[in-house]
Image (cartoon, grey):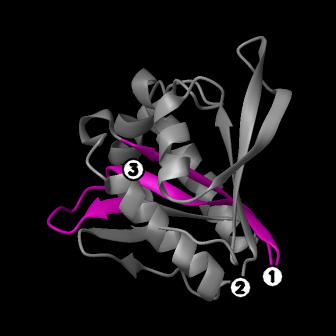
């Protein structure tokens, strides 16, 4: 699937490999409860947690099971979010995930990053189906999925268990043959 980590450039963003140099950026990102509110992840409590997350991303990439890019604005060095395919089945499907520092919400950054990896997935990785599970109540992500052309397929009832509670997840998908923005 991947021999070398691919960098993707867009008009405003650079999607890059997440390294140990980004530990503080990830701690800032995933330490914010606004960011992790609809995530199956409690906010990071210390920088060591960020190092473990970076190691997780690296191992998933090396095993060819997933790929997670850091989102960097073209005029900055730090990463302000992540985007990627959490699970990948060659020539078949991938599951997307994304997150962004709260200060950068509602600026079109996730839209631009998702367009880039969707194109990469369909063309470079030959994926046919890209999926996203969105926690019920996450209005921003639901809006984003519709905005970029994903179709709501249904509700996965009590699909996620987190913080001693079950949550419904909304399943969205985009096929290579679907029109998308």
**Residue 91, numbered circle:** 1
**Residue 60, numbered circle:** none
Main secondary structure found in the magenta portion: strand
Residue at image x 65%, y 26%?
136
Residue at image x 67%, y 53%?
151
The numbered mark, 1 or 2, whose residue comes first in the sequence reads: 1
Nearest-to-viewer mark from 3 and 2? 2
Q: CA distance from mark 3 to mark 1?
A: 27 Å
Tell me the residue that label 2 is attached to. 126
Can residue 124 be seen at all in this image of the molecule?
A: no
**Percent x, y for residue 22?**
37, 54
The single residue placed furthest to the front in the displayed view is 179
The numbered mark, 3 or 1, whose residue comes first in the sequence reads: 3
Residue 138 left/right relative to 107: right
In the rendered image, the vertical position of residue 85 relative to residue 166, given as above or below: below
Nearest-to-viewer mark from 3 and 1? 1
The single residue placed furthest to the left in the displayed view is 75
**Percent x, y for residue 33?**
44, 22
Residue at image x 43%, y 79%?
7
Residue bounds of the magenta highlight = 71-100
- Disc 1 and disc 2 in contact, CB within 8 angstroms: yes
The numbered mark, 3 or 2, whose residue comes first in the sequence reads: 3
Tell me the residue that label 3 is attached to. 81
Q: SS of the residue at dot 1?
A: loop
Whether residue 98 appears in magenta in the rendering, the answer is yes
């Amino acid at each position: 699937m991947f021999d070398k980590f691919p960098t993707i450039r867009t008009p405003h963003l650079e999607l890059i490999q997440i390294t140990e140099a980004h530990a503080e950026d990830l701690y800032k990102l995933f330490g914010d409860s606004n960011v992790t509110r609809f995530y199956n992840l409690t906010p990071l409590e210390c920088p060591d947690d960020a190092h473990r997350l970076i190691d997780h991303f690296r191992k998933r990439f090396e095993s060819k099971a997933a790929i997670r890019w850091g989102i960097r604005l073209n005029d900055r060095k730090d990463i302000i979010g992540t985007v990627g395919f959490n699970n990948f089945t060659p020539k078949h499907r991938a599951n997307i995930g994304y997150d962004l520092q709260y200060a950068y919400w509602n600026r079109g950054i996730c839209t631009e990053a998702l367009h880039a990896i969707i194109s990469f997935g369909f063309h470079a990785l030959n994926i046919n189906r890209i999926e996203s599970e969105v926690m019920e109540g996450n209005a921003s992500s639901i809006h984003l999925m519709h905005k970029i052309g994903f179709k709501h397929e249904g509700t996965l009832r009590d699909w996620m268990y987190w913080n001693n509670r079950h949550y419904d997840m909304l399943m969205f998908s985009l096929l290579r043959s679907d029109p998308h923005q």
